[in-house]
Amino acid sequence: MANLETSLKECLSSIDGATAVALVDYTSGMALGTLGGGKDFNLEVAAAGNTDVVRSKLRTMEHLGLKDEIEDILITLGTQYHMIRLLKGRGGNGLFLYLVLDANRANLAMARHQLRRIEGDLEV
């Protein structure tokens, strides 16, 4: 099991194209931990905004009567990919990992695979 800081560092170092990562509580919109971002990308604001995305999708699934779980939500921009991975397992309820990738350097399939692996090792 890896602690939060170690897991966030692993996201940035092992996922090609990763530029920012956060662990977010979507019940409050608060980032529990962040790494990366910078003056041109406020990770706290992005984390809070993506809380609305998660809540909206969960609400829509409920209205549709879907009895499934969200694994990932992917938002593609011209130069970036934003990946949201809802945490499963003990201690992960109400949390998601938010990953920002440089679209020119990232491999989405590998990023998704590695994020799933990191999630499995994360100790919340």
Image (spheres, rainbow, N blue to C red):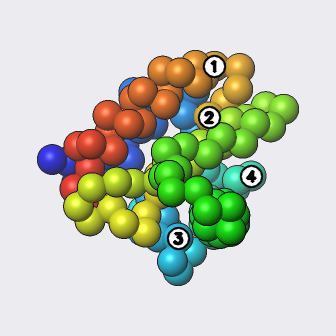
**Circle nearer the N terminus (3, 1):** 3
Q: Is residue 25 placed above or below 40 in the rendered structure?
A: below
Mark 2 lies on a secondary structure that is: strand
Q: Are marks 3 and 2 in contact (CB under 8 Å)?
A: no
**Circle nearer the N terminus (4, 2):** 4
Q: CA distance from mark 3 to mark 1?
A: 28 Å
Q: Residue at x 49, y 45 (%)?
A: 71
Q: Are marks 3 and 1 in contact (CB under 8 Å)?
A: no
Viewed as shown, does residue 73 lie left or right of 97?
right
Q: Are marks 2 and 1 in contact (CB under 8 Å)?
A: yes
List the residue tagged with mark 1.
105
Q: Is residue 103 placed above or below 49 in the rendered structure?
A: above
Residue 13 rendering spot, x and y as whole percentages: 41, 31
- The residue under label 3 is which amino acid type? Tyr
List the residue tagged with mark 3.
26
Is residue 6 something one can see in this rendering? no
Q: Residue furthest left?
A: 1
Mark 4 lies on a secondary structure that is: loop
Nearest to the observer: residue 6 or residue 29 = 29
Residue 53 rendering spot, x and y as whole percentages: 69, 61
List the residue tagged with mark 2.
101
Mark 1: few, some, or many residues within 10 Å (few <14, many ≥20)?
few
List the residue tagged with mark 4.
40
Q: CA distance from mark 2 to mark 1?
A: 8 Å
Q: CA distance from mark 4 to mark 1?
A: 19 Å
- The residue under label 2 is which amino acid type? Leu
